Image (tube, rainbow, N blue to C red):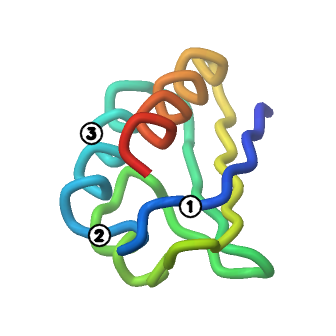
């Protein structure tokens, strides 16, 4: 299991376009990838509406967790999307 913590910097938070980028990146890997909004809301990062339902805003702390055969590549891809877009 690999994890990555991130604080959202985008003024709008996770909105439609970056959510789509995150889901697309996660779907490219076999590993299970989840997004957790502190303290306890969780979403499957491969499901667009679950991600949007979390309502992640600017300044929110999130944790990305990847578990599976290609977890290192999955976490790196999602981290890249977060840094570039949020």
Gap between marks 3 and 2 measured at Cα: 14 Å
| Label 2 SS | loop
Q: Badge 3 local density, few (<14 within 10 Å), some, or many (20+)?
A: some
Q: Are marks 1 and 3 in contact (CB under 8 Å)?
A: no
Asked whether, in this view, residue 6 is left or right of residue 47, the answer is: right
Name the N-terminal-most of marks 3 and 2: 2
| Disc number for residue 24 | 3
| Disc number for residue 35 | none
Name the N-terminal-most of marks 1 and 2: 1
Give x and y (percent) for residue 68: 65, 27
Asked whether, in this view, residue 19 is left or right of residue 9, the answer is: left
Give x and y (percent) for residue 37: 65, 72
Gap between marks 1 and 3 measured at Cα: 19 Å
| Label 3 SS | helix
Vertical placement of 71 versus 43: above or below?
Answer: above
> Toward which corner of the image does residue 36 lie, by quadrant?
bottom right
Which of the image's four quarters has the N terminus? top right
| Disc number for residue 15 | 2
Give x and y (percent) for residue 77: 47, 25
| Label 1 SS | loop
């Amino acid at each position: 299991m690999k994890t990555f913590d991130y604080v959202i910097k985008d003024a709008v938070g996770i909105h439609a376009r970056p959510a789509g980028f995150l889901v697309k990146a996660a779907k490219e890997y076999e590993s299970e990838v989840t997004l957790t909004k502190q303290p306890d809301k969780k979403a499957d990062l491969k499901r667009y509406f679950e991600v949007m339902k979390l309502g992640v805003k600017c300044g929110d702390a999130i944790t990305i967790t990847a578990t599976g055969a290609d977890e290192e590549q999955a976490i790196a891809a999602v981290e890249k999307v977060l840094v570039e877009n949020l």
